[in-house]
Amino acid sequence: MTDIATGWTECVAMRMREQMLIAGAFEQVAGELPFAMLGVDSDNDSAVMSESVFDYCKGHGLVQTRSRAYKKNDQAWVEQKNGAIVRRLVGYGRLSGVAATKALATLYASSRLYVNFFQPSFKLKSKTRYGAKVHKIYFTLATSCDRLLAHASIEPAIKARLKAQFESLDPVRLLQDIWGAQQTLREIAAPGAPNGAAPTRSPDVDAWPLVDGWLIAEPSASAKELMDRLATMFPEAYAGNAQLRTLQRRVQAWRAEGAKEMILGRLRKSTGIPAEV
């Protein structure tokens, strides 16, 4: 489930697609969201478009809508998160049974915190077509938590709770919990499944919020030094420096972006041009 305004994403592990389980999943998500759930927009799966789900939405005052038939792009936001979050975390291995469901639930319990509080993402601001070319403008890179804190409709008490929760979280511990759950899924995945149960670690995605914090504190730190730190913290994931080249490219891009912002900031200051959102 994904909130379009902020990108806040919640995943729930279910043993099967069944209408009562889906209604229970809605109840679980509603209790964990930092804001009120106002409505549900789903695809046309019969398990979702069912009497139990309809009764749940009606009983809780939720507006229930569905995508148009044969219009898959109506669910583009959810499908994007399915690829960027679920498949990156879980992979494409075949999972079934109680053990796999429990392992997925453990994975999602940690990943929801890491993704929503520490993993930044771009959000499209506008898109303009010029003939065959499409020009896109994005909002500033931010986490879902950042967007909630900046949202005018969120009550101050909720923002205070979010800030307190953020300060209590340890991204390193969350990553360790995520990788532990991924290892469990890998072990119980069906033999012969493509790509196993979980993908290879990538410092470009998995640990970047941690590396980003190191770079902010020590801008001159080399990619090799940063990789050594990752290998010390997570020897099973980063031993051997196999991902060093990937990290080098990411650090180079980070520094290039910082230099660009520095130059643009000076130009805006000298010309009086306001910063682009």
Image (spheres, rainbow, N blue to C red):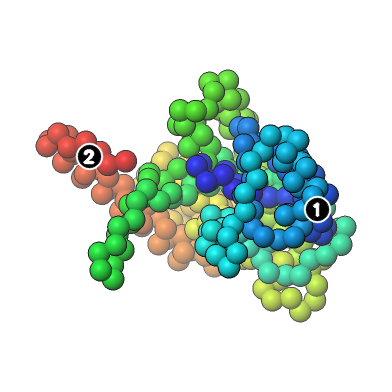
Q: Is residue 214 left or right of residue 14?
A: left
Picture residue at 42% right of the left edge, 58% below the top: 250
In the rendered structure, which amino acid carries the disc numbered 2? Gly
At x 74% / y 46%, what residue is drawn?
54
> Where in the figure is residue 68, as x and y percent of width and height?
58, 60
Up-down relation of residue 255 to residue 160 (above or below): below
Pinpoint residue 241: horizontal percent, then vertical percent.
54, 64
Image position, residue 22 (x, y; %): 77, 50
Question: Closer to us: mark 1 or mark 2?
Answer: 1
- The reply, left or right, for residue 64 in relation to residue 72 is right
Query: Counting other residues with Cα less than 10 Å from the Cα at mark 2, is it few (<14), some (14-19), or many (20 or more)?
Result: some
Q: With respect to residue 246, does 53 lie above or below?
A: above
Answer left or right for 21 relative to 10.
Answer: right
Q: Secondary structure at mark 2?
A: helix
Quadrant that contains the C terminus: top left
Which numbered disc covers residue 159? Answer: none
Q: Residues within 10 Å of mark 1 (few under 14, many from 20)?
A: some
Q: Which mark is residue 265?
A: 2
Cα gap from disc 1 to disc 2, whole angstroms:
53 Å
Res. 197 image quadrant: bottom right
What residue do we see at 72% from left, 34% from top?
Answer: 60
For the residue pair 48 and 215, the one nearer the viewer reads as 48
In this view, the residue farthest toward the bottom is 192
Looking at the rendered structure, the secondary structure element under dot 1 is helix
Q: Which residue is mark 1?
A: 19
Whichever of callouts 1 and 2 sits on the residue coming sooner in the sequence is 1
Asked whether residue 11 is in view, the answer is: yes
